[in-house]
Amino acid sequence: MRSFLCVFLLTAAVWGQKRVAPSGYETWDRFGGSKENIHYSSLKQIHRGNVGQLKVAWSYDTGDAFQGSEMQCQPIVVDGVLYATTPKLRVIALDAASGKLLWSFDPWDGKQQNGRRSRGLSYWTDGKQARVFGSAGVYLYSLNAKTGQLDDGFGKQGRVDLREGLGRAVDRFPMSSTTPGPVYKDMLIVPTLTGEGHPSGPGDIRAFDVRTGKIRWAFHTIPRPGEFGYETWPKDTWQHTGGANNWAGMVVDYKRGLVFVPTGSAAFDFYGSDRHGDNLFANTLLCLRADTGERVWHFQAVKHDVWDRDFPTAPVLVTVRRDGKLIDAVAQATKSGHVFVFERETGKSLFPLETRKAPASPADGELLSATQVLPLAPPPFSRQMFSEDLVTDRTPEAHRIVLERWRAVRNDGPFTPPSFEGSIVFPGFDGGAEWGGQAFDPETGYFYVNANEMPWILRLVPARASRGVMTSQRLYVSRCASCHGDNKKGSPPQFPSLEGLEKRFTQARVEEVIRKGTGRMPGFGSIGDGGITALARYLLKQEDTEARVAEAPKGLTDLKYTIDGYNKFLDPDGYPAVKPPWGTLTAIDLDGGKFAWRIPFGEHPSLERKDTGSENYGGGIVTAGGLFFIGATNLDKKFRAFDKLTGKVLWETVLPASGNATPAMYQVKGKQYVVIGAGGGKSGAASGGTYVAFALP
């Protein structure tokens, strides 16, 4: 009897920690779908058995698409109203059952023709009033959720200038917020996008009062004197450099009052002779007190980053089984193709970490960290080394040309330092993991991540002085060539060609873009009016004139080296230089730290092979109906539903444009919908501006 009782009690204890289908995930009222940002819906009207019957329930064309535009917004749905943004950053409210427009807000008042990306909106209500928060340019704004009118009590006439309150003058620097922040109590904690070249603003993490727009707290990611981590930078670096910002989004553990914030690289991304040291809190997962901004713990994934290894996505609050118990954890995916998993309260890694020796830099003045840290599990979801056996064999000629180039560049693994002959970065600057975010299934413990496997070549070149009296050609080389190349041809579609601008733009328009930025490009108002005019004339008329460029902030020096552009390693026909897969979709069992399944993701319509995978941007969602929905693939424009346990495709459709956004799932009047923004615009694909919702007949 005693033996039976022991077995019963042991079984009951283990059963008590068994994963079960959770309740309370029927809505999609915030970025990521839920407080945990797990991209999970407990709705199951649509399931494995009937997903093949999905049809278009409604579609809404924003009418805002333009050449090269994108639409990366994940909609939110509250009380039957869908809130989203358009390619021109208008905010729209639609009837979530019909797609009918309820109201629209134009942050540019009709004056701006295009804008930066927007990945979504934030919502807040106290039961009496409700607000939608968005961002365009340098402004954070608050809208009445019912009317779309600006809230006059928020900031100045409904807007807050994100450049204010940073403790230093940054009025001439780019600053925006492309990812929605979480609302905690009566505060909105805001991600910001700063420049990662010189000069640029600091990446402070700030919480704003949802009613007044006043700053309630701020955490300095580039520490100031007396603050933790100050010694990891040269003296007084905070006064003149920037970056180390959270642009990818964050997540709050509301029960514990903790906010988890991943940060990006420090300025300048690829050469850091002016920032010797580890550079806390760049490339760091921060755990802060959500009430005060106080640091609880941190983990720095890359010390003294010179590879642009930003954390590309918001973390996910997960549960991981250990010794028969479920532990509350936070999982962070990386551009390098890894997943770090930590206990939420302590920051203890739930998988072993390995310290590796890293090569020294060949560039004079540079001082890289001698070691870097990587997890031993789960295994990388992207390949880590572009070895000779992975050189493309698509055609004999492609193999020959790529192999010749491969042998001419440096290739020492994940931490190959930037070099003058060129260094392979694999996976490349766009990941690995992407900003669309990952999904977690609390029923199975599976973590879903879509990824790119594109090699890029990083090459250092001498820089030229970027201030004082200089020619417009020198100004172009110092400020523009790292993205658009010395020859102005760029690296489309990420970095477009600047050839033939005179056929498309007036000088006034080019000067406006240089000053304020557009799309992925930051503004360069810091060079002053004379520099802006000279640069515009050089781009439009090839006139190489002299101009006095505005002085840089005190303490900021010209760097000796820059890069020759963002260069994908492609074969002579424009395909990736590496063997497929070029894009993947992976389900990782976080309990065991192993792959559950992994498949090529995406197709190249121009190729007969349909298993190559392709570049993909945007994330997916997982459901209690046994499904994983995702668009993301650049070239085939498909929206797919997979069996979440096996990776088998159960349904697919073709969208009006590529669905480079994360879908949302919701229910109105008992009917379940899944909606995605079809914005296209990547990898040479056509741009679009349509939201498409699907439901069962």
Image (cartoon, rainbow, N blue to C red):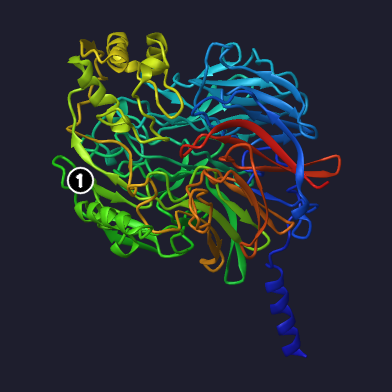
Identify the image quadrant of the N terminus: bottom right
Query: 634 or 662: which is nearer to us?
Result: 634
Image position, residue 370 (x, y; %): 23, 54
Query: 581 or 250: which is nearer to us?
Result: 581
Number of marks present in the image shown: 1
Query: 290 or 310: which is nearer to us?
Result: 310
Query: 66 or 691: which is nearer to us?
Result: 66
Is 508 left, or right, of 462 in this rendering? right
- Residue 298, above or below 174: below
Label 1 sits on a secondary structure element that is loop
Task: Please tell me which residue is depicted at 79% across the width and 56% down the height of the picture.
Answer: 50
Can residue 304 be seen here? The reply is no
Image position, residue 259 (x, y; %): 54, 42
Is 671 left, or right, of 597 in this rendering? right
**Which corner quadrant of the image does residue 538 belong to?**
top left
Residue at the extreme left of the image, as rendered: 364
Amino acid type at mark 1: Ser
**Which corner quadrant of the image does residue 393 belong to?**
bottom left
Task: Please tell me which residue is depicted at 72% across the width and 89% down the height of the picture.
Answer: 3
Residue at the extreme right of the image, as rendered: 669
Is 551 left, or right, of 362 in this rendering? right
Can residue 679 be seen here? The reply is yes
Is 148 left, or right, of 553 in this rendering? right
**Mark 1, residues whose alpha carbon is within 10 Å: few (<14), some, or many (≥20)?**
some
Image position, residue 527 (x, y; %): 29, 16
- Residue 444, above or below 534: below
Task: Please tell me which residue is depicted at 43% across the width and 60% down the height of the picture.
Answer: 380
Q: Which residue, given by chain and number where applicable, does mark 1 sit on?
A: 419
Image position, residue 564 (x, y; %): 25, 36
- Residue 288, above or below 548: below
Task: Please tell me which residue is depicted at 52% across the width and 17% down the height of the picture.
Answer: 113
